[in-house]
Amino acid sequence: MILPNEHGEDDGTISFFKGDVTDIASLQEIFSNLRGYEVVVIHAAGIVSIESRVIPLLFKVNVLGTKNIIELCLINNVHKLIYVSSVHAIPSTKKIAEIKEVTNFSPNKVIGPYAKTKAEATQAVLEAVEQGLNAVVVHPSGIIGPYDNGNNHIVKLAKDYISGKLLAGVIGGYDFVDVRDVAKGCIAAVDKGEVGECYILSNRFFTVKELLEYMQIASNGPKKICVPISLAKIMLPMIEWIAKIKNKRPLFTKYSLYTLESNGHFSHEKATKALAYHPREMRTTIADTIHYLQGRQVPLLA
């Protein structure tokens, strides 16, 4: 499914439908003529936001849109729903400790508008399981990788790095994972995921300094320093003002800085055992991302 203002060419393997998860009527065509098929729905539509303020569209898409998909899956007796949640839906811990899957989600247990919408939507999916929906939840960590031109915040970091616009990084980090590994994890969840179960699709904790070093190696570019988050917080008003003047999203926000200094250590042990999930080396991910941004061919799902 693509948005009404987007374009896709059917190729005999993939057919494109135009729709909007916030408009249930627009989804009817997608769920029509399904008789005789074993239908699997992978619901990945959503808004990823590092904003600190509540954006009405964020709730409308992430929560109400997910509930529309749930309703149509129940009505049409789909074989399986794979819901792409986020590790942000899982309550964090103040101390540095490995975070694993949980069975209950609440917007009151997480911080930030994005996390709250993903927690509420995830709980709605699990409640639908009790109504008979065969659903599985996957929780990607911070997704990065090729085939994105800069809409993803970390890909934008890479794009700014190779263009020379990135002045410095920040001291902090998070768990980042290749988008291709997440895609493989979603497909594995179709075949191997157990109804009502949640699986974290992560890699490991990486500092921003490590990511920048990988970018330097991949592009033979300059070394970049990382400033303390405390200094970045002082600079935030100026960063946001410049982004507003240029009509661009800021690379760092109050919420993104909070994320980079929070506990970003997630375990994918459950997914590895149940789904045969094995993320690739981040050095490869960064190199492929840099090469894609430079216009070179990189592996799609290899």
Image (cartoon, grey):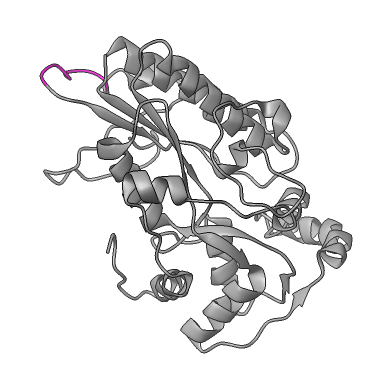
Location of the N terminus (image quadrant): top left
Residue 180 placement (x, y as % from top left): 36, 57
Left or right of 298 on screen, residue 70 = right
Instruction: State the residue at coordinates (29%, 44%).
Output: 188
Q: Report the magenta stretch's main SS.
A: loop
Q: Position of residue 71 (x, y in %)?
A: 40, 14
- Residue visible at 51% across and 89% down in the picture: 220
Which picture quadrant has residue 280? bottom left
Name which residue lies at 39% across and 51% down. 272
Residue 79 visible in image: yes
Question: Could you say which quadrant of the image residue 232 lies in?
Answer: bottom right
What residue span does the magenta drawing correspond to? Answer: 31-36
- Number of dots carrying numbers: 0
> Which quarter of the picture shows residue 119?
top right
User: Magenta stretch: residue 33 in it?
Assistant: yes
Location of residue 203 in the rendering, given as x and y in whole percent from the top left corner: 49, 59
Query: Magenta stretch containing residue 13, yes or no?
Result: no
**Residue 26, relative to residue 184: is it above or below?**
above
Q: Position of residue 268 (x, y in %)?
A: 47, 51
Q: Quadrant of the C terminus?
A: bottom left
Q: Is residue 286 above or below residue 217?
A: above
Residue 60 seen in this snapshot: no
Residue at horizontal 54 percent and vertical 30 percent from the top = 62
Q: Is residue 33 above or below residue 13?
A: above
